[in-house]
Image (spheres, rainbow, N blue to C red):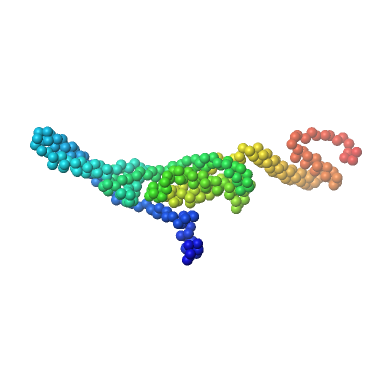
Amino acid sequence: MSPSTPNTNIPEAEVADRPVGHDGVKVNVTEQDGWTGGPGLAGATIIVAALLFIGSIAMFIRAIILADAGNGGVGLLILSVPIFIISLVMFGMVKIISPGHTRVVQFFGRYLGTNRRTGLSLIPPLANSTKVSVRVRNFETNTIKVNDSGGNPVVIGAIIVWQVADTAKATFSVEDMDEFIHSQAESALRHVATSHPYDGGTSHNPSLSGSTDLVSQELADEVAARVKVAGLEILEARISALSYAPEIAQAMLQRQQASAIVDARETIVEGAVTMVEAALDQLEEKDIVELDPERRAAMVSNLLVVLCSDSNAQPIINTGSLYS
């Protein structure tokens, strides 16, 4: 197979998991439990380390005194150094972890595991650890201006609630998880906003203003898919700011007002027709007055004018007949 010929036998799942545009290798690491000692072992380590530390200092002082007196003390001085180093190593093994925090433990660059034990705990000697918070955090994205699916510029912002689910991926897979989730959230928000109209949506394509819950859930799902590689979990996403861009806000407001007026007029006319029909039926049923087609049309016209008028109707008393 030549280098330019694509490999069509690669499974679809593997293709989707590959980096785009090159054959690089992603950091493939998953959180695992590392060896940790409990508070009892950690307390005993502190006591032993303290005794060794005090002993090494005492031996060092004794060696200096003997050297000043001309009685040697070089061996005692040499012995105090490794004891002092051992005590420092033992002190470094003891870690204090508060609730909502973890320790990612490494041994000369190799990932050993994550310590989620709170309080006093013990890690392997010469290992270093990085504190990673697993508390729930939130942030508000920048208010960005994008075009909705109809091409209208809108201003939109969102609040993202998240936490670290996989401490190993959050530490090793991305350079800075806070910067990573901020940029990915804004990118997802931009994509979701351009996929929906601002208003007047349908069941298949809900609007940003009329279906905020559906749009927020879509935003949460998209952000979660983008930050999964970093071991982050999205708990909630909510639209925090939504409006037309200032340059078209006035025109869109007029359009909304016109639409509202049309809807109100339709409701008024529909109600007026129902009321006129009921009035005529009752007049005929109770035989109050007999109306020929012309009088009936005149009464319908007058009632509709009264019921549909914006201002109060001014009654006019006709002392003659309809035909004079």
* Badge count: 0
Residue 210 visible (yes or no) = no
Q: Residue at x 33, y 51 (%)?
A: 110
Q: Nearer the viewer, residue 290 or 315?
A: 315
Left or right relative to 182: residue 281: right
Up-down relation of residue 313 to residue 102 (above or below): above
Residue shown at the point (59%, 40%) measured from the top left: 243
Q: Depth check: 165 or 151 in front?
A: 151
Q: Is residue 243 visible?
A: yes
In x, y percent, where is residue 308? Answer: 75, 40
- Foreground residue among 309 and 140: 140
Q: Kindly indicate the quadrant of the structure image that contains residue 26.
A: bottom left
Residue 244 image position (x, y, % from top left): 61, 40
Q: Which residue is drawn at 48% across and 64% down?
A: 2
State which quadrant residue 130 falls in: top left
The residue most toward the right is 324
Q: Position of residue 177 (x, y in %)?
A: 43, 45
Q: Toward which corner of the image does residue 62 lie, by quadrant?
A: top left
> Where's the C terminus, which quadrant?
top right
Q: Is residue 286 rendered to the left or right of residue 24?
A: right
Q: Residue at x 29, y 51 (%)?
A: 35
Horizontal and vertical percent position of residue 116: 34, 47
